Image (cartoon, coloured by chain):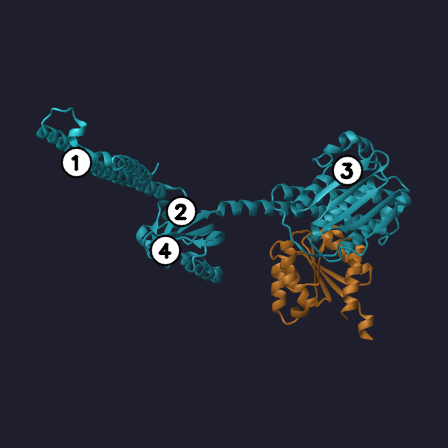
Chain colours: A cyan, B orange
Amino acid sequence: MSPVKNYLKHLLTSVVILLVLLSTLFLSRNFIKNFISNPQDYFLSGLESAEIYFVTVFIGLTVIFVLISYVIYLLLTNNTRFHLEIWNATKDLALSKEQFKRLYDSAPVPYIMLDKNAEIRGPNKAALRFFSVLPEDIVGKNLFSYLTGEDKEQAERLFDYYKSNVPINRKEVSMITKKGETRIVQLSIFEMKNPGSFSSTGLAMIFDITEQKLLDKAKTEFVSLASHQLRSPLATTKWLTEMLASGDIGELSPKHKEYVDKLHTANEDMIDLVDVLLNVSRIEMGSLTVDMKQTNVEELTESIFGELAFLINKKQINIVKEYNGLFQNIQSDPKLLRIVIQNLITNALKYTPSGGTIAVTFEESSGEKTITVSDTGLGIPESQQGLIFTKLFRADNVRGLNDSQGTGLGLYLVKSVMDSIGGSISFVSQENKGSAFTITL
Amino acid sequence: MDKIKSKKKVLIVDDNNNLTSVLVDKFNLSGFDAMGAVNGEDGLKKALEFKPDIILLDLVMPVMDGLEMLKQLRETEWGKEAKVMVLSLLDEATYIAKAMDSNVYGYIIKTDLSLDGIVKKITDILQSTK
């Protein structure tokens, strides 16, 4: 309970008691009047009037004294209580001030108090460590002058924000330290209202994220490097086998040609596998960037069919396209969406026997855009449908297939990509009848 | 008359010798006059000497990488308008954007296209911009 509340409660109780006392007197005013004017009526006859008067006056004075001392008591106790509370409060304040100062000073996060011109007033120890300076090197300097020169405009914009009391929340900026080192930080500045004064000051917080940034960069670079080094020999093999098979540099015997073609196919499988593996590691390392822009899904799907034309013809698959004139200009990430649709169509192709049908359908109802890839293929056993999007999962009925080079990563990748571009995926499937995968954008 | 008779010249800049040789062979067989270079420095020198109709440029190379060569090429009188097609293994959007900033004709990811596909693409470009 706060002291003020306590005090009010005390005052209220006292006033109520006082009111009760006063109203008792007020209600018995006739009786008192009578008693004073004709006291002999209330005493046994035979008493002398002088004695009666003495008793009356004595009782009267006693009542008055009781009232006065009650009032004095009230005033005194209130005053004492008040003083006592002030004393306690001052002690608490001093203690919390001390605690705050310690917390502020030894907090691991750099804190800086700023005046209204964003000049540095009270840097804590972590702030001094961050800039590697002594207090006198930094106090009085404008905080925004420590933002690196590369983006002066941003520093000025943030300074304008500060002057108009707009809070700055975890803004990523580069700051320069005394050693000349550039650190990437998240800068937050909040206004602190000063009671009893119109001027306000600011509290700046600096979260150094340089290490995380470097780590992220290292991860991305690793995937880049791996991608480059793994693809290099694959590209060579791809083109050399193609050159051999084309007969441009001399006809091969049919048997030679057959083997070179097999080599070429195996290499193509390897290229696909490397692509999938790299995309999966990008997703798992969180370095997959989503780049939303205008996307023509119809064109994209057509180009996938173009790439797969050879296989489609070879297996004599009937393709049904129901684009319905939709999705020729939607916001999406064309590269990622391509990975998704390509995987779904390739899967359909892989698991649909010769002569089967694959259909791609675009639909839009109440703002929901869906793309469905359905096939008349092997389907997924009902007991395993719950596992279909898990990593390295392969359904029992496709494991034994001779010419299917499934990796168990495709649908996992598709699901992860859909999650990153803010969509979803679902499917219905019946074993030996076919499957239909639907993505919602 | 002269132009129709003369073969189109292609310069292939790539540090992977296996790739360069098969590309040079393929282009020569397809009626081009092709030449290879092993890094950016070599590529820049050969580009200015050979004055190819188009340059196929790899990005990651020792001595001088593709982007640096492109930058220096653009600073020369002849190289300002030279046609360049990037032919790389990197598929990250950032690299593609960087290359595109230097006014290149396109960006081919090596493992995405067949030899015939590349020859067709280059033929199309040279025909459409004659």
Indicate which label's residue lies in the foreground, 4 or 3.
4
| Residue A406: mark | 3
The percent position of residue A425, horizontal first and vertical second, equals 72, 42
**How busy is the neighbourhood of tag 2: few (under 14 within 10 Å), some, or many (20 plus)?**
many
Is A116 rendered above or below residue A353? Answer: below
Q: Is residue A346 left or right of residue A98?
A: right
Using the image, name the chain to which the residue with label 3 belongs: A
**Alpha carbon distance from label 1 to label 4:** 71 Å
**How far from the left and from the top, in percent, is residue A312?**
86, 47
Q: Residue A335: give x, y in percent of width and height.
A: 70, 51
Q: Secondary structure at mark 2?
A: loop
Work out how far the residue at label 3 is from the one at label 1, CA to CA, in angstroms.
Answer: 118 Å
Badge 1 element: helix
Which residue type carries mark 3? Gly
**Mark found first going from the N terminus, 1 or 4:** 1
* Disc 2 with disc 1 on a shared chain: yes
Q: Quadrant of residue A328?
A: bottom right
Residue placed under numbered mark 2 in the picture: A110
Q: Are marks 4 and 2 in contact (CB under 8 Å)?
A: no
